[in-house]
Amino acid sequence: MSVTTQTLESEQLAILGGPKTVPQFIPDLFHWPIVTAEDEAAVLDVMRTARFSGTDITRQFEKEWSEYQGVKFSLGHCNGTAALLAAMYGCGVVRGDEIIVPSMTYWASALPCYALGATPVFCDIDPVSLCMDPRDIEHRITSRTKAIVPVHYCGYPADMDPIMAIARKHGVKVIEDVSHAHGTYYKGRLCGSIGDVGAMSMMGGKSFAIGEAGMLSTNDQLIYERAIALGHYERTGEIKDPHLAKFAGLPLGGYKLRMVQTASAMGRVQLKYYPARIKEIQAAMNRFWDLLEGVPGLRAHRPDKEAAKQGSTMGGWYNPLGHYIPEELGGLPVAKFIEAVVAEGGLSGRGCNTILHTHPVLNQADVYGDGKPTRIAFAQRDVRQSLGSLPVSEALLLGGRCLGIPWFKHDRKDAIERYAAAFKKVALQADKLVNR
Ligand SMILES: *Cc1c(COP(=O)(O)O)cnc(C)c1O
């Protein structure tokens, strides 16, 4: 690190009246998605030709997405929640079934199964990857388990090899939730093409961002056709499965889940540039963490050197976060650390999602008038999980063991050095904040 950043780190903390490490916010460094005249022209063309609800552009986007993912079929959806619902139905999840899913994720990894009469069973996460812990899956499998839903959390690839082995052994499907991990590789394989089906959000805040949109990708024709049958009545004429084909013309599920073509038009343009753009994000984010190597209290959330050598990456580094280890900083609570970083002009926040297993919707809500909590009514046994049942997920959130870090979209050395210096300065002077 340059002499200047060393000086920055030894100055008085900004929260105690010292100078800011990052004097100025640079919007362009963080702005996303990158939209050019080419995106604008593609979207305007849809508006001017009034093809919002057609499927011609969506089909082109699906074809190109399939080529990118290396799968046979892709099906555009109105959002990621819809794509996950369709993936669950595609895998045969129906009334009374259970799916195994992490508790530390956005609710849409789990809750769409309620619409199918199924219930989530939550598993814990690995403390390093923050993805589904393969050691916490098998004992949760019952005769009613239909699918396992790994989430590639904040871009980190879930450990798919053992997850696939467990799923194959027990004859259950694997639905990858790729909403955080477009373009992430697991040991050289693109996430979303490893399980039976991949489903992902492409909403405006995600790494692949085209509005409100979602995509389902699979090599399995029956999963693809069941997804069409559920929510794409205008395409049911293409279904080959003789049982499903009988119902062509109306959606089986009563859903209409297609992607609006302003999104698919933007998606086609975004996809052309996506690999190059996330390559720059990867360079920037790795630069940030390399600068913080060895700093007490902070650890990168990224595949280690060995895993990186095997071809695992972080995709577009959606919602990047770091591990926070309060015991290395005199017990300084993460909220105080974040406050001090923000005072430096740095960017930080809670980082992780809220846990799902303790939420009232999973414990008390009677959504469909069964006279008992939906989760019990559907599972036909009490699968509720109380506080204390998933210690790693709970510690991450309630124990304050992670924090958000800046999500750089460009690899600008000087700026990134300043942001890293803000985190390092606070970590090195944490003792001044402990009793404050
Ligand atoms: C955003 C998100 C979804 C849902 O996608 P929407 O497009 O918002 O419906 C699903 N799973 C995860 C992990 C997400 O972060």
Image (tube, rainbow, N blue to C red):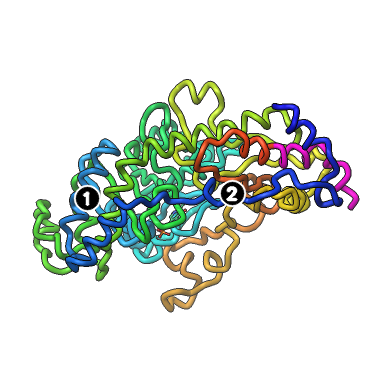
Q: Is residue 163 above or below residue 86?
A: above
- CA separation in Å, label 1 and label 2: 43 Å
Relative side of 183 to 254, left or right: right
Query: Above or below — where is 196 with respect to 77?
Result: above
Q: Quadrant of residue 294?
A: top right
* Crowdedness near tag 2: few (<14), some (14–19) or many (≥20) residues, C-alpha within 10 Å: few
Q: Nearer the viewer, mark 1 or mark 2?
A: 2
Q: Position of residue 365 (x, y in %)?
A: 52, 72
State the residue at coordinates (44%, 68%): 377
- Specify the quadrant of the image occupied by residue 405: top right
In the rendered image, residue 52 lying in the magenta stretch gets the answer no
Question: What is the quadrant of residue 229 in the picture?
Answer: bottom left
Task: Quickly name the residue at label 2.
Answer: 26
Q: Secondary structure at mark 2?
A: loop
- Image-quarter location of ligand 1: bottom left
Which SS class for mark 1? helix
- Mark nearer the N terminus (1 vs 2): 2
Magenta: main secondary structure: helix
The residue under the point 53% across, 68% down is: 361
What span is in magenta?
Answer: 421-436
| Residue 371 in the image, given as x and y percentages of width and height | 47, 78
Residue 115, percent across and down? 36, 66
Residue 224: mark in rendering: 1
Disc 1 packing (10 Å; few <14; some 14–19; many ≥20)? many
